[in-house]
Image (cartoon, rainbow, N blue to C red):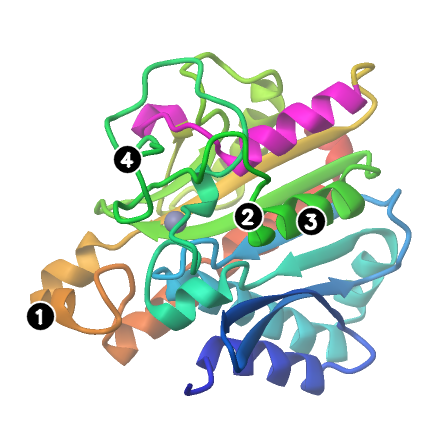
Amino acid sequence: MARLAELDGIEALVARARGLVRAEVLEHVRLDASTRLPIYALRLGPDDRSLPTLGVFAGVHGLERVGTNVALAWLRSLVESLRWDAHARARLESCRIVAIPLINPGGMARGRRSNPQGVDLMRNAPHDAVDRVPLLLGGHRLGPWLPWYRGPRDAEMQLEARALCDFVEAELFESPAAIALDIHSGFGTRDRLWYPWARSTEAFPRVDAARRVVELLDRTYPNHVYMVEAQSDSYTTHGDLWDHLFMRHAQLHEAGDATLLPFTLEMGSWTWVRKNPRQLFTTGGPFNPVIPHRLERALRRHLALVDLMLRAVHNHEVWR
Ligand SMILES: [Zn+2]
């Protein structure tokens, strides 16, 4: 099998950033008898898990390659800043960054949304939605031949979902202030920034904190491109991993001594498809900007957002 360019990208970043980025292989995903693909986790900054922490995640859905590339573009930019910008280095003494830039390498290698077992990882957490979900899209148990399959009832979470959840619990749950940004691309013309819930149209318990972070974004970048909403304003789903993690975190921190804010960046891909309808039939598929200048634009477009999330983590007293 040809190497995945995105895995090469992660390895190149780690090789170039020795001493700044620490890498670990969380799991290997088995594709076939001779192919196993690593799920890499990266860490920057001190190893002290009680520090404010930003988590950057991408590639949950194998078709959404652009998300992994956006995460890597930001990490590369940060690494270059750390080489010459004393201010950037100082920030990373009192907060930390963790990342899984490609959670579903098997799906990406196969050119499909799901993992190699046909399971949509973002529908794979054990809980059901509180509110009605859209047919199929909201998650179903009919079988892996349809997209948005949740996996078998009462089964363990899939290897990739388990790896993500274990990593987030280990790396973000001890932090007094943690923000997770999970990067996706989907249908729609706008780039959306979602906070929870996916499981319910009710307001999630830390909605005020989420809105304060969004207010920082609005005030700092008044011309930003994002449509900010609760995910359930777009649609509700069963088994969302961030809902699951938020609920686990809330159980452990009933006293309110720590905050975990999971955000999802859902890049709207209709603009790329509308300008280049033929790409619907290419291997890049409908969820990625296929033409190089559009990919470059997507890579530039979100750097300020991820930077702002890091600054928000560092200055968490402002929004917590
Ligand atoms: Zn996605």
- Image spot of residue 314 (x, y percent): 76, 46
Query: In the picture, residue 246 is in which quadrant?
Result: top right
Q: Amino acid at mark 4?
A: Leu
Q: Is mark 2 within 8 Å of ligand 1?
A: no
**Closer to us: mark 1 or mark 2?**
2
Q: Residue at x 28, y 35 (%)?
A: 137
Q: Which residue is mark 3?
A: 54
| Mark 2, secondary structure of its residue | loop
Give the numbered dot on residue 158.
2
Q: Is the magenta region chiefly helix, strand or loop? A: helix
Q: Which mark is residue 137?
A: 4
Mark 1 lies on residue: 278
Q: Is residue 229 above or below residue 101?
A: above
Residue 302 position, x and y percent, is: 45, 58
CB atoms of marks 1 and 4 within 8 Å: no
Q: Amino acid at mark 1?
A: Arg
Q: What is the distance, in whole Å, between disc 1 and disc 4 at their CAs?
A: 25 Å
What is the span of residues highlighted in magenta in the rendered image? 232-253
Residue for point 46% across, 12% down: 202
| Gap between marks 4 and 2 measured at Cα | 19 Å
Q: CA distance from mark 1 to mark 2?
A: 34 Å
- Along the line of sight, the residue nearer the viewer: 193 or 232: 232
Circle nearer the N terminus (1, 4): 4
Mark whose residue sits in front, 3 or 4: 4
Q: Residues within 10 Å of mark 3 (few under 14, many from 20)?
A: many
Report the mark closest to the observer, 4 or 2.
2
In the displayed structure, would residue 9 be above or below residue 72? below
Q: Nearer the viewer, mark 3 or mark 2?
A: 2
Q: Amino acid at mark 3?
A: Leu
Q: CA distance from mark 3 to mark 2?
A: 24 Å
Report the residue at 69% width, 27% height from top.
Answer: 248
